Image (cartoon, helix red, strand yellow):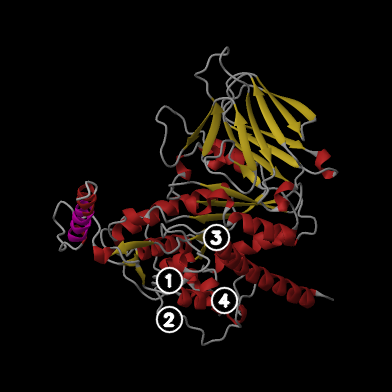
Amino acid sequence: MNHNDHPVRKTLVFFVAVWTGIFAFMARPHSPSGPFSDWPRWGEAAPSEAGMSPEEAQLVLDAYTHPVTDGDFLGPTTESPIVAVPDSVTTQPPPAPSIPPSARTGSETDMGGYDRAAIHSFLHKNLQLVGNDEAFQTLGNFFAALNAPARKPAIHVLHYGDSQIEGDRITGHLRNSWQSLWGGGGPGFLSPVSPIPSLAMRQSWTGEWKRYARFGKQDTTIQHDRFGLMAAFAQPDSALSDSTRAVASLRFEPHPRGYRRNRSFNQLHVALGQVNEPTTLQLTLNERDTVSIGLQPDSLAQNVSLPLAALDSMAFESLELQFDGGYPEINGVGMWTDSGIVVHNFAMRGSSGTVFRQLDRDQFRQQLGAIRTELVMLQYGGNTVPYIEDAERAELYGRWFTSQIRLFQSLLPGVPIIVIGPSDMARKTGTRMETYPQLLWVRDALKTAAINNNVLYWDMFEVMGGEGSMAAWVQSEPPLASSDHIHFTPTGAKQIAELFRQSIQAEWTLWQNTQAEQSLVDAP
């Protein structure tokens, strides 16, 4: 007998026993109250099923590129009637009458600022902005600014949002498209110590920096509200002594994968919070041109604006800001041209969009007033969805969001606001990925808040295809959304940005047509 046979036999018996145990465990009956209820079983290991197939999702997207007819219909709609939200809190959901004519997409009437009667003839209903007469008339103010030949000083668009726009996603494509049409360059404001890499610009820093935000996880040691227009600030670590503190600097370089127009700018703007003691800001451009600026102690806010004329005749390679002495609070570092349009990406991971009233009002007003803001976009709702328990809580969120809209209206009178609602979001139910049931409550609360306060709403949920579309976007080739069934992939983000661009382009075309017709009427 071979003495090696026994160990081999024991090994084989061991493996058979292990696999038998695994098979028995995975084949166990379902017991929701058992200690292993959260562990996988064979039936749950299969790929998740989606309510909408990738092919059906693609048909929705294809419908946006085809000529529009009166019979266009993409299937059952999840759009709910829009109703007024009273200022006082109610304990029962309000009744649901049909949408009044003034709150429709406005295709049937002359919307004050411009005639939108032809909107259905070339833009799919899902892509159309929704709002009342006053909201569209205010949007005309944005177009009037764009219609000026010089567009100087630069026209600024503020794109606020949650993690769906992190890394310059969605915003970057809009910025590049609009700058190609209306001129301008540069990425706009950048977070001085960005927690997420951005394609807008490559960033690095030296020294000990700390970043504080008014949203997400907050540092309770901060006893003030000077978070500025980005709701965050970065600061050299004041806990270090002068003998151990390294020189604090911020460095910006072109991102090799970013849009080339991000590299084209001739203005620098540094938005500051409090400066505790005299500080010298030294700017070095392309490793050779250096400028020093003194920052005086300030109890609230100051803005440093500096033309970079050298960039009119040479390519941008690097920009370094060095702070010597003091611990200034830096809210943002902005780069843009002195004319055209610039679109800022203000991403707030974890935010529900209800942070703005918590900011120092005077500082927020000063920093918004330092630039020529002509459009505000608020893209929120996704972070709220998982925590909404019922329709009443969603309505409460809508009232909180209403207060944010009214704040912007008070600080930027006459400036149009577009609320971009949440995308579809899915969670696993059995073997299927299904839309969060409370998502529609949140969507309706935001849409109601927008319409009741004379601002516009763009329904990203319906644009995607409605209920079940997120799972289909995840399974698409290439994937348009990530496996978390919440965030878009870069390809999906670009798709959404392009569809939103088409919506704005349609309104711009109608506004131009109205102006041309009016000029013929007024001609002698």
What separation in Å lies between label 1 and label 2 (alpha carbons)?
10 Å
> Can the viewer see residue 268 in this picture?
yes
Residue linked to disc 3:
493
Circle 2 sits on which residue? 75
Number of marks in the rendered image: 4
Residue type beneath disc 4: Tyr
Instruction: Tell whether label 2 touches label 1 (CB within 8 Å).
Output: yes
Earlier-in-chain disc, 2 versus 3: 2
| Nearest to the observer: residue 307 or residue 210 | 210
Residue at the spot 54% in from the left edge and 86% down from the top edge: 70
| Quadrant of the image occupied by residue 435 | bottom left
First along the sequence among labels 4 and 1: 4
- The image's mark for residue 466 is 1
Depth check, mark 2 against mark 3: the one in front is: 3
In the rendered structure, find residue 84 and report the number of the disc placed on it.
Answer: none
**Secondary structure at numbered mark 1:** loop
Disc 4 packing (10 Å; few <14; some 14–19; many ≥20): some
Residue at 22% x, 57% y is 19
Q: Quadrant of residue 430?
A: bottom left
Q: Find residue 445 and report its horizontal and vertical position in percent.
A: 39, 61
Q: Relative to 89, does residue 228 appear above or below in the rendering?
A: above
Q: Secondary structure at mark 3?
A: helix
| Quadrant of the frame with the C terminus | bottom right
Q: Residue at x 74, y 41 (%)?
A: 267
Q: Main secondary structure of the magenta part?
A: helix
Q: Is residue 133 magenta?
A: no
Q: CA distance from mark 4 to mark 2?
A: 14 Å
Q: Which mark lies nearer to you, 4 or 3?
A: 3
| Number of residues whose C-alpha sits closer than 10 Å to that of mark 3, classed few (under 14), some (14–19) or many (20 or more) | many
- Is 55 placed above or below 460 here? below
